[in-house]
Amino acid sequence: MKILLVHNRYQQAGGEDNVVAAEAKLLAEHGQEVELWSVDNKDLPAGLKGKINTAITTTYSAASLAIAQDYLRTFKPAVVHVHNFFPQISPSIYDACMTQGVPVVQTLHNYRLICPGAMLMRDGKICEQCIAGSPYQAVRYGCYRGSKLGSLVVAHMVATHRKQGTWSTKVNRFIALTDFAKSKFIQAGFPLEKIAVKPNFLHDPYAGINRLARTNPAFGLFVGRISEEKGIKTLLSAWSGLAGHSVLKVAGSGPLEDLLQDETNIKALGRQNASDISQLMQQAAFLVLPSEWYEGFPLVLVEALAHGLPILASRLGSMADIIEDGKTGLFFTPGDANDLAEKAQWLLEHPEQVEELGENARRVFLEKYSSEQNYAELMAIYEAVQ
């Protein structure tokens, strides 16, 4: 099958880029013919004129339409899989596909199509006003990068295509990463029958090798962006209340990383590469994910499951679709530092139970999130739209 993948990279590389690369590699390894049309926001035109042009073309880009049509004529794909069109490619990609009679699959990596801020979050709290209400509410609050003008541009894109029925008539199948995410898009008016659920996946880090038993793991691990929506303040408050010398290792960077410097039992490691993260996951007692927004499907969760690492996470949004409380990890109340500290202390003091949770996590990974399972699910989606 010929498959055209379409992706607009953000200026700061993130999980979406990794998912696109992993799926492209997976498809190619199974003999599919894959072409990637990728643009990068690092190449956005600078200056006032460039910003104005980007703002105008975010809702619909004639230039991208022409490029898309050229890809379709020359490559002749059986299906086009759009991962992200914002802001350079724009929804014009859908019209190019309709003209050529090529079915479209769209992965919903975040909530951009129903929320200008993409996170269903405002002022550090969950916000669902734009799901059923006007997306122009985002302008009042500057939901897109704190900019009212930028929020107006994105809100116009969301509102225009909602009114035109783009999401219901021009996309053959959406891929939501969890059942929870699917429910939010259905609330926003997306057609139930067009949304499939397929999680992210990971190539098995232990493929062909034996997984070593953990030797006296004595620290918790956080991997991700050091920012407010990730629950960093709650995490720091919780860890300051833990007994003894319980260590938390933090891998990542972000706007709140300076808060880590004054904590004696927290080791700030900075940004780590994939190999370093894998080694940390083989040594840690558990991964802590204290997010206070509706996470999509962070790859760090799949990594933890693949490494047989239990997860201590906030009971929020998609987490309940991924983590099984008492089986592959534990939940705590979002934003509740005392509850987080209590659960972390229990995990650090019960290594045998933690080992059992880890074995369950590894088993769930092999059943649900392996590359082979994901390939079968992805191809079934492609074949269903033919």
Image: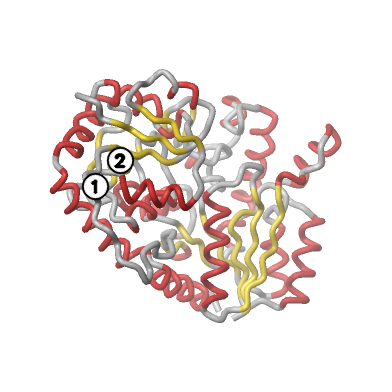
> In the figure, 15 relative to 129: above or below?
below
Q: How did the renderer colour the structure? A: secondary structure
Q: Would residue 95 be visible to someone looking at this image?
A: yes
- Write the residue at 62% across / 49% down: 163
Seen as rendered, the residue at the extreme right is 49
Write down the residue under mark 1: 329
Q: Quadrant of the N terminus?
A: bottom right
Residue nearer the viewer, 325 or 226? 226
Left or right for 199, reference 55: left
Image quadrant holding the C terminus, namely: bottom right
- Kindly tell me whether residue 129 is visible in this rendering: no
- Badge 1 marks a residue whose secondary structure is strand
Relative placement, left or right, of 131 versus 214 is right
Q: Amino acid at mark 2?
A: Ala
State the separation of the CA atoms marked 1 and 2: 8 Å
Return the x and y of residue 223 as percentages of the image width and height.
42, 41
Viewer-proximal residue, 321 or 248? 248
Q: Residue at (48%, 30%) from the top-left corner?
A: 227
Which amino acid type corresponds to the residue marked 1 in the rendered image?
A: Gly
Mark 1, Cα crowd under 10 Å, few <14 / some 14-19 / many 20+, is many
Task: Name the mark on residue 280.
Answer: none
Q: Which residue is mark 2?
A: 313
Q: Earlier in the sequence, mark 1 or mark 2?
A: 2
Residue 75 picture location, percent across and down: 73, 76
Q: SS at mark 2? A: strand
Residues at badges 1 and 2 in contact (C-beta under 8 Å)?
yes
Residue 113, position as x, y percentages in the image: 56, 48
The residue shown at (65%, 74%) is 102
